[in-house]
Image (cartoon, helix red, strand yellow):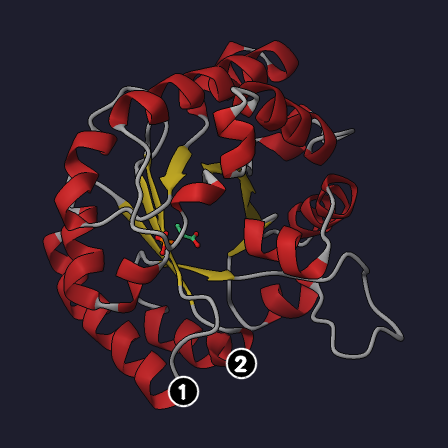
């Protein structure tokens, strides 16, 4: 059976003491969460400390990005094996902010997915359309193209490690949320698309998260949809009470 997952994407927020405080608060309150797996994703430089704080817990730890190269002369880059070596177990890949501000393409994301899996990290792979594409009713085509590009030559064995996050770009950080019906129809489409490439078993076991202004007040309705298996949470993940309340929405 697939897992319910609530993953927090901290982005470039919090300094080190604030980040550690947030992890401790989440750890403390996570005792009240029993229907979802939690994942936190602080900035790279907090990962090592976060891993020791979380070592006796079931809370997952994600990096927000990784290099598309294995190692070598790539100044400023962080490799999957480095991320694994400090105790993280997931990586967020293909976030729309990486696509929009750093020119990431499906091809580049594909390279990162393969490296993550090779280094025992589970990728949380993002897809989703911008507002214009939604208004032109191109969202299915856009998401199908992203999935095809990102999972090119990813084998079924590799795909078992993947989590997908559907994040309509028009809903990220805007306060606008996809309706539960909009989320359901595209999550169902994503599952169907994966089924066509990887078969029913992998598609049924795949956790597909919704992301885009998800908060305690709307999570319950969205998570109630059959193909929504949780959320990738931005703003609301920066507050332990909100993050935990979202995880209690199942
Ligand atoms: C995100 O950036 O992944 C996200 C979903 O952000 P927010 O919840 O703030 O819209």
* Residue 143 image label: none
**Residue 34 appears in which quarter of the rendering?**
top left
Q: What kind of element bears circle 1?
A: helix
Q: Residue at x 77, y 48 (%)?
A: 108
Query: Where 99 sits versus 62, above or below?
Result: above
Give the CA separation, mark 1 to mark 2: 8 Å
Q: Position of residue 68 (x, y in %)?
A: 77, 56
Q: Position of residue 35 (x, y in %)?
A: 19, 40
Quarter in which the N terminus is drawn: top left
- 242 lies left or right of 198: left
User: Pointers 1 and 2 in contact (CB under 8 A)?
Assistant: yes
Q: Residue at x 71, y 51 (%)?
A: 104
- 82 lies left or right of 41: right
Residue at the spot of label 1: 16
Q: What kind of element bears circle 2?
A: helix
Quarter in which the C terminus is drawn: top left
* Residue 45 image label: 2
Whether residue 1 appears in this view of the structure is no
Along the viewing direction, whichever of 133 and 42 lies nearer the viewer:
133
């Amino acid at each position: 059976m697939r897992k319910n997952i609530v993953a927090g994407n901290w982005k470039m927020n919090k300094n080190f003491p604030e980040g550690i405080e947030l992890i401790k608060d989440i750890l403390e309150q996570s005792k009240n969460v029993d229907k979802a797996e939690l994942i936190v994703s602080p900035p790279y430089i907090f990962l090592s400390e976060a891993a020791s704080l979380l070592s006796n817990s079931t809370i997952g730890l994600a990096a927000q990005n990784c290099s598309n190269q294995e190692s070598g002369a790539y100044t400023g880059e962080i490799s999957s094996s480095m991320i694994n070596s400090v105790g993280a177990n997931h990586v967020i890949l293909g976030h729309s902010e990486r696509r929009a501000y750093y020119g990431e393409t499906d091809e580049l994301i594909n390279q990162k997915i393969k490296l993550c899996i090779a280094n025992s990290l589970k990728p949380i792979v993002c897809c989703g359309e911008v507002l214009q594409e939604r208004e032109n009713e191109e969202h299915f085509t856009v998401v199908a193209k992203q999935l095809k590009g990102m999972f090119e030559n990813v084998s079924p064995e590799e795909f078992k490690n993947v989590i997908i996050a559907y994040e309509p770009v028009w809903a990220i950080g805007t306060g606008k949320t996809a309706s539960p019906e909009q989320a359901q129809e595209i999550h169902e489409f994503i599952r169907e698309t994966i089924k066509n490439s990887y078969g029913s078993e992998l598609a049924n076991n795949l956790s597909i998260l919704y992301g885009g202004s998800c908060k305690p007040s709307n999570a319950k309705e969205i998570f109630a949809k059959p193909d929504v298996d949780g959320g990738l949470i931005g703003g609301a993940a920066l507050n332990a009470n909100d993050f935990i309340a979202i995880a209690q929405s199942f």
